[in-house]
């Protein structure tokens, strides 16, 4: 019986320690986001960050908030990055995957520059085949060929 109470006290102490952690554990919100040479870049308090360093950060675009969950080099074009992105609307707490992993989709998205900021194109199997065949092209030429931008 004493062991159970000791475990409860340890659990309570662990929860208190976690609650006391600094807010740096929370994701940061990017001040500005752009696409440069086929990869996302962002600005947090005047510091430019890109690619894998963006993982765990979020940004607002209109009424939506996007969060960057993962980033990786494209397996066929190392200069090109792809992302796993989640989104939520307005004050909602529920996040949804931007690209769902399914038979037709890999679950990854490519960032494409736009006048109003970046937009994302979900990779499907046809696009993956196109990028595999574009091996040897620059990231910009491969994006133009496979995404039509």
Image (cartoon, grey):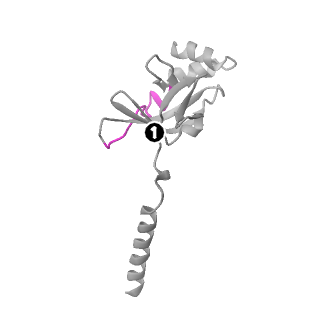
Packing grade of label 1 (10 A; few <14, some 14-19, many >=20) is some
Looking at the rendering, which quadrant does residue 71 occupy? top right
Q: Circle 1 is placed at which residue position?
A: 29
Secondary element under disc 1, as helix, strand or loop, is loop
Looking at the rendering, which quadrant does residue 13 occupy? bottom left
- Residue positioned most to the right: 136
Q: Is residue 117 left or right of residue 77?
A: left
Chain part drawn in magenta: 93-110
Residue shown at 45% from the left, 35% from the top: 85
Indicate yes or no whether the magenta region holds residue 96: yes
Looking at the rendering, which quadrant does residue 19 occupy? bottom left
- Frontmost residue, 78 versus 127: 78
Say how many tags the image has.
1
Is residue 71 placed above or below 136 in the rendered structure? below
Q: Is residue 49 left or right of residue 22?
A: right
Residue shown at 56% from the left, 30% from the top: 41
Indicate yes or no whether the magenta region holds residue 42: no
Relative image position of residue 11 (x, y in whole percent):
42, 72
Relative image position of residue 81 (x, y in whole percent):
58, 29
């Amino acid at each position: 019986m004493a062991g159970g109470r000791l475990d409860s006290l340890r659990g309570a102490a662990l929860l208190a320690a976690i609650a006391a952690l600094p807010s740096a554990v929370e994701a940061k919100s990017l001040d500005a986001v752009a696409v440069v040479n086929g990869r996302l870049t962002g600005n947090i308090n005047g510091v430019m960050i890109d690619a894998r360093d963006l993982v765990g950060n979020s940004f607002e675009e209109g009424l939506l908030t996007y969060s960057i969950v993962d980033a990786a080099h494209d397996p066929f074009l190392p200069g090109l990055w792809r992302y796993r992105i989640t989104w939520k609307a307005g004050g909602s707490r529920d996040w949804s995957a931007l690209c769902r992993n399914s038979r037709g989709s890999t679950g990854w998205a490519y960032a494409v520059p736009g006048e109003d900021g970046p937009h994302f194109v979900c990779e499907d199997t046809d696009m993956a085949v196109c990028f595999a065949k574009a091996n040897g092209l620059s990231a910009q030429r491969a994006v133009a060929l496979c995404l039509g931008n």
